[in-house]
């Protein structure tokens, strides 16, 4: 496909807008083509001439990048993410920022699971970068919401837990409360944007299935149930391997699942396709 593109691949003119296409897909109807969204987050910030910290701490830069991606690449969607560390930062974890590399966990909020009760309840309008992200998402919705579906990505509860105590410590013990996620999710629902979960630490590259069932799935289910109780829907992406979890995801009620590129898309369609939409599976390094 890439070789064809370089030799002048002809791309048919769209028959539908992204909004129309999304609506028909949600209704189970035929569309002119599959939707294609660039979910690159902060990694493309240099394209608008700013460093990653400048992006991380500016709602205006976040919105500017989404507009750039829409205008330059004609993406079928737009949105912002709390990033894998954003919720944990709001709860007290220290994050290291670099000019041209994604933010990294520097110091967890707690040193062991014995201190879990010391974690504070967040105020989404004051703590960490959450107010900046919410402002940026509101701006994206206002500027692009009539052109493409807009969504906000929230970190899965188990991954939030790993950013609060450190992945190694978490895997040695295990626990968490999803209530902080629900406060942020409510704000996204109020804005009328879609919601997606990124939960890489729930991958079977790290966990056994029984561990996922006991320590991750119940708390993720609480988030999904909360969203659906408010009339919303959501999707999930798990980095790395996830095949052994697919049957467990069917009854959760999620509307979309994005398997990583290490999984077989045909098998995902066969197993999950009757119950939810399938997206992703593109190898980002090789393609981009």
Image: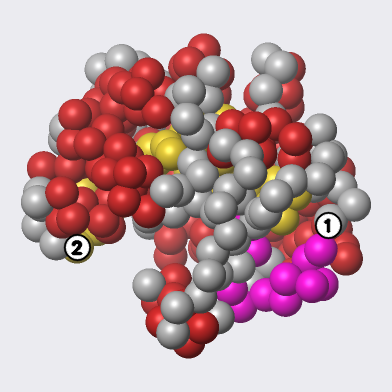
* Magenta residues, start to end: 258-269
The quarter in which the C terminus is drawn is bottom left
Question: Residue 182 appears at what percent x and percent y?
Answer: 54, 24
Give whichever of 138, 114 is nearer the camera. Answer: 138
Q: In the image, what residue occupies the spot 43% across and 60% down? A: 167
Q: Earlier in the sequence, mark 2 or mark 1?
A: 2
Q: In the image, what residue occupies the spot 63% across and 39% down? A: 16
Is residue 82 placed above or below 47 in the rendered structure? above
In the structure shown, which secondary structural element does the residue marked by tag 1 occupy?
A: helix
In the structure shown, which secondary structural element does the residue marked by tag 2 occupy?
A: strand
Taking the image as shown, residue 99 lies to the left or right of residue 287, namely: left
Residue linked to disc 2: 101
Mark 2 to mark 1: distance in Å?
34 Å
Taking the image as shown, residue 64 lies to the left or right of residue 123, namely: left
Residue 226 in the magenta stretch? The answer is no
Q: In the image, what residue occupies the spot 23% across and 36% down? A: 64
Residue linked to disc 1: 272
Give whichever of 193, 200 is nearer the camera. Answer: 193
Question: Residue 169 appears at what percent x and percent y?
Answer: 43, 60
Is residue 202 placed above or below 71 in the rendered structure? below
Give whichever of 144, 184 is nearer the camera. Answer: 144
Q: In the image, what residue occupies the spot 63% across and 72% down? A: 241
């Amino acid at each position: 496909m890439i070789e064809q593109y370089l030799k002048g691949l002809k791309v048919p003119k769209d028959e539908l807008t992204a909004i129309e296409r999304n609506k028909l897909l949600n209704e189970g109807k035929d569309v002119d083509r599959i939707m294609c969204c660039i979910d690159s987050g902060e990694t493309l910030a240099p394209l608008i001439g700013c460093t990653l910290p400048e992006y991380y701490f500016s709602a205006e830069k976040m919105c500017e990048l989404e507009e750039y991606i829409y205008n330059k690449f004609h993406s079928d969607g737009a949105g912002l993410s709390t990033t894998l560390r954003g919720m944990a930062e709001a709860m007290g974890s220290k994050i290291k920022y670099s000019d041209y590399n994604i933010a990294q966990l520097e110091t967890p909020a707690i040193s062991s699971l014995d201190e879990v009760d010391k974690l504070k309840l967040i105020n989404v309008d004051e703590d960490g970068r959450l107010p900046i992200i919410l402002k940026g998402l509101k701006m994206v919705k206002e500027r692009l919401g009539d052109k493409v579906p807009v969504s906000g990505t929230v970190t899965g509860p188990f991954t939030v837990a790993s950013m609060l105590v450190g992945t190694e410590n978490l895997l040695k013990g295990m626990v968490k409360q999803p209530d902080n996620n629900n406060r942020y999710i409510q704000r996204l629902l109020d804005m009328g944007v879609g919601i997606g979960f990124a939960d890489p630490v729930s991958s079977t590259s790290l966990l056994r299935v029984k561990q996922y069932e006991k320590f991750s799935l119940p708390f993720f289910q609480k988030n999904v149930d909360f969203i659906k109780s408010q009339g919303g829907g959501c999707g999930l992406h798990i980095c790395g391997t996830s095949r052994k979890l697919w049957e467990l995801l069917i009854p959760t009620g999620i509307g979309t699942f994005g398997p990583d590129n290490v999984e077989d898309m045909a098998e995902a369609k066969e197993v999950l396709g009757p119950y939810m939409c399938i997206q992703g599976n593109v190898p980002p390094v090789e393609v981009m």
